[in-house]
Image (tube, rainbow, N blue to C red):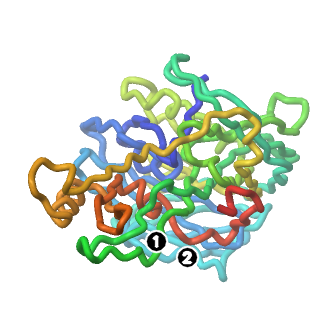
Amino acid sequence: MNRSFHNGGIPGKIRYPLILLFLLCPIIGCIDPFYPKMEGIKSILVVDALLTSENRSFCVELSRTIQTQDSEPVMVSGAQVIIKDKNGDNSMLLETAAGIYKTDSLQFQGETGNSYVLYIKTPEGDEYQSDPCILNPVKKIDTIYYHKDQEIQNNGSVIHDGLRIFIDSENNGDGKFLRWTYNECWKFRLPDPKRYDYINEYNIPEVSQLKQICYRYHKSDEIIIHTSESAQTNRIENEPILFIASGISDRLLIQYSIEVTQFSLSEKEYRFWEEMKQIDERGGNIFEKQPFSIKSNIHNINDPAEPVLGYFQVSATDKKRFFITWEEIADLNLPVYNYDCESIKIGPADYPYPITFDKIYAYYTASGSCFTGPVYGPFGPLEKLVFTSPACADCTLSGGLAEPDFWIDLETPQNRK
């Protein structure tokens, strides 16, 4: 089986039917979608909603499917969105941006054992309601760990070495269905950052802030589910979460962190994710099984036959974070990622005709290169200017300078550099 891996947080290309676009984008990370013309099919409501037992604000995103690639996403603004529980309590969601509705974290929080219904009334007066969903409890994740492994790509023609991350967990005693998502963060260091600003050949000051070390983030964009309905025990062991190809990603060069979230599912929601996963793995071929057959738990109150895309997800969650340092995997004999950064050192002496440093700087920066520093001769005169690609000179183009609140710099030689 081919499993997908990610290079520097950029997901591989996946093609989906258009009517799945808005449903899959928030949870699977679709790229390069297929845009068929859906003749005779009216715009369909798409609902992305997740309610957990966490102490935070919850979001419901409403949009509608579109017909053509050039059309702008149609967010559903001005709707009435309410979460109702089995005790008759209602929580009205506030629209914070077009099509984005959120709960007040001080007024509402999901409770295990309670049952919830999502109610939506569009500006046109159409009313939608979900099936009652019980917020099932979930057991804790026991451990997160990794093993050296290989990933097979392109029907076996390419093999990558790296790490596969696993978890062990005790499943919920009242249920046999689980789903996982993860958030990655890693610290990285560019080999040749921009250290100087060029004003002119007589004024080349140091930069006010060196953008060499940053933190990069990536959210899971695949469907990871598990059922133990046919197993004799609910104990889950060696559940694979993701694979990191060490030779094509900078995740493992200094320090890496992953936070795994475990969700408890009803059997009905599990079947929903199972069908979504099948479409994902097939690549969403338009001539294969269509997404209309995927049953949502949200329905038009007055027209039950109207298709709705999305699912009102209700689940308790457990989260666990895990760190990996470069030193911990140094003895595994894995390929090491090398930045594809090439520096160009050039000065007036390299040209067959007279040219100034100002013109050299203007030419290379206009061509998309980034100036990183000067080269001086043994007795002080400026001889060359150094250029590289922007991605190799400024880590903020793919990450952030601020250290995350959860980050712990483990005491390693790589972190001390």
Q: Visible in this render: residue 305?
A: no
Q: Earlier in the sequence, mark 2 or mark 1?
A: 1
How far is disc 2 from disc 1 in space, using C-alphas?
8 Å
Query: In terms of depth relative to the viewer, which is nearer, 89 or 337?
Result: 337
Q: On residue 80, which mark appears?
A: 1
The image shows residue 229 at horizontal and vertical percentages of 80, 33
Q: Residues within 10 Å of mark 2 (few under 14, many from 20)?
A: some
Contact, CB < 8 Å: mark 2 with mark 1? yes
Query: In terms of depth relative to the viewer, which is nearer, 115 or 373?
Result: 373
Query: In terms of depth relative to the viewer, which is nearer, 34 or 331?
Result: 331
Give the structural element (helix, strand or loop) at label 2: strand
In the depicted structure, whether residue 34 falls above or below residue 402:
above
Place residue 92 in its image quadrant: bottom right
Q: Residue at x 32, y 50 (%)?
A: 344
Q: Residue at x 52, y 30 (%)?
A: 281
Question: Quadrant of the image for the C terminus?
Answer: bottom right
